[in-house]
Amino acid sequence: MKNIRNFSIIAHIDHGKSTLADRLMLEAGVVTEREFRNQLLDDMDLERERGITIKARSVRMDIVIDNEDYVFNLIDTPGHVDFSYEVSRSLAACEGAIMLVDAAQGIQAQTVANVYLAIEQGIELIPVLNKVDLPTARVEEITKELDDAFGFKKEEIILVSAKTGVGVDILLREIVKRIPVPEGDVNKPTRAMIIDSQFDDYKGVMVYVRMLDGQLKKGDPIEFFSNDKNYEVTEIMAFTPTITLMEVLDAGNVGVVCANIKSLEDVNVGDTLVSDKKLGVQPFPGFQKPAPMVYCGFYPVQGEDFKILGIALEKLHLNDASFSYSPESSVALGFGFRCGFLGLLHMEIIQERLEREFDLDLVKTSPNVTYKLMMTGGEEVLMENPSKLPERTKYNSLNEPIVNLKVMVPEASIGMIMTLCTERRGIYSKQEFIGAERVIIEFKMPLSEIIYDFYDKLKSSTRGYGTMDYEFCGFEPADLVKMDILVNNVPVDALCTIVHRDNSQIRGRKIIKKLRETIPRHLFEIPLQAALGGKIIARETIRAMSKNVTAKCYGGDVSRKKKLLEKQKKGKKRMKQVGNVTIPQEAFLSVLGGD
């Protein structure tokens, strides 16, 4: 075990984690120059197109350093704020981490968040400055920033270029020196922590484990601590980065176990896998299950795809335990699922994966956050669907989630960011300078004000230099109201939202203007209204299609024309009372897809 090193790479988005992982694999010789390509560990099409890591990936590297054989288990992590859950999960399986900082951009908001995450878990950090070959690299300045922010001395910081390979050989030796040897005992009863899982059509559920004690080999019995399910190991593998079959998985190592597990519910990420519970093995504390922060409904455009959508969500949920789903129905959209996500990017990724991997056409409802209702009876109720909000008399207060938002911006942009955050009901907490020209500003802010287009506004206000990170810190009461959208005096449940009273009129007007542009004209007039309770706050009207009923009257008595017009008027009035308004899918897509 003294020659095993388990580590991950943590950094802000776009600071070069995946490139460094590729370079380490090339230096270790697990891939040849011919097989080498960028983003080797990002095997999802979406990851390659967007240039981001979505799923944490592990790779085993057998490497020789100073004539001694070592096993490096590297776990590449995502950098986006929505996937910080993946980072915490990866760190739980490691003894150390490479903290990567871009030599041109310096410390960013997500760097700070990930460093504190690592410190909380008691993990050894190796500070690394990447992209030192760039002409814009500010090595001296960023080294001072690292010292000021985290107390890393100049001699502790390693300078590398993941693209050209400069300094990577030094980094490999430092990993051996600085990252602690994993703890564990091969002779104790088998105990392993489940860090991830994935469904394979041929092998069943593939369980990614970090061995804590004992060893596993083909034919061994295994038991899951949380649900007492028993299986027999059929295969043991490691990613190198191709799948390699192994004889034994020893304590301290990271690998993949297959045991003909067909049921997706049997495997819980964070659970402890043991050989036999009767041996008195204690479960690993695991890690906190993430609570979804943003909810929206997914409905198939074709009603018959509902079952396929259910199976698709079940498969994705196994591979990504951080999103949840439950069936629901809507009068306007039919049968679908209410899904919970960690953020808007997470929601976009899941939607794109459903559409690509399972060939589904989906309509998604307006994203909203989870609200907490303090009922008149004294109980607390969490509410994920705005259309389920009870009457005002049944609850005392409606509380919204508040986050602690950290924004890192250039000094010149402080004024614009202050204005942007206060306009969105943000309350200033404090600010702290990182280096001479950049500052971290903290705000207490409602999550509902961040999830829509805050990130885009932040980037445009700071000319692309602003970065953000946020963490949930509780619920607080606010003046929130349920806004209904009425089409021909009938509420449409799919368009119902909860808004702050001050913003309700602007939001309502935006929605009904979009509806007026996309709902086709009918033979009768259609009123579109936004309402708070019984009070109408915005209205638009789609005019009726006009038919010239007097066209056949050429000349003659005017009373004949009046009679025909009167008859048409009565017909339209009757049609308005009994006629149904057809709302096309494009109308929902235009409203729900907008900001």
Image (cartoon, rainbow, N blue to C red):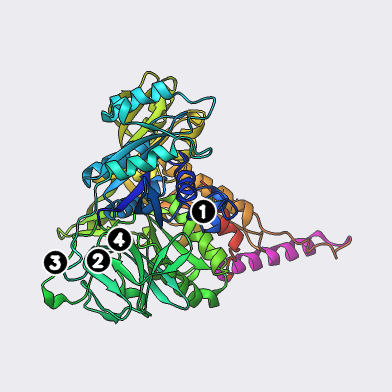
Q: Position of residue 334 (x, y in %)?
A: 49, 71
Q: Which residue is mark 2?
A: 192
Callout 4 amino acid = Asn
Q: Indicate whether residue 568 is drawn in magenta.
A: yes
Q: From this view, report whether residue 108 is shown above or below residue 348.
A: above
Seen at 22% across and 75% down, the residue is 227
Callout 1 amino acid = Leu
Q: Could you tell me which secondary element the residue under label 1 belongs to?
A: loop
Q: Could you tell me which secondary element the residue under label 2 belongs to?
A: strand
CA distance for labels 1 and 4: 21 Å
Q: Which residue is mark 4?
A: 253
- Place residue 294 in its image quadrant: bottom left
Q: Could you tell me which secondary element the residue under label 4 belongs to?
A: loop
Whether pointer 3 and pointer 2 mark residues with C-beta atoms closer than 8 Å, the reply is: no
Sequence order check: which comes first, mark 2 or mark 1?
Answer: 1
Q: Which residue is mark 3?
A: 282
Q: Observer-nearest residue: 295 or 584?
A: 295
Whether pointer 2 and pointer 4 mark residues with C-beta atoms closer than 8 Å, the reply is: no
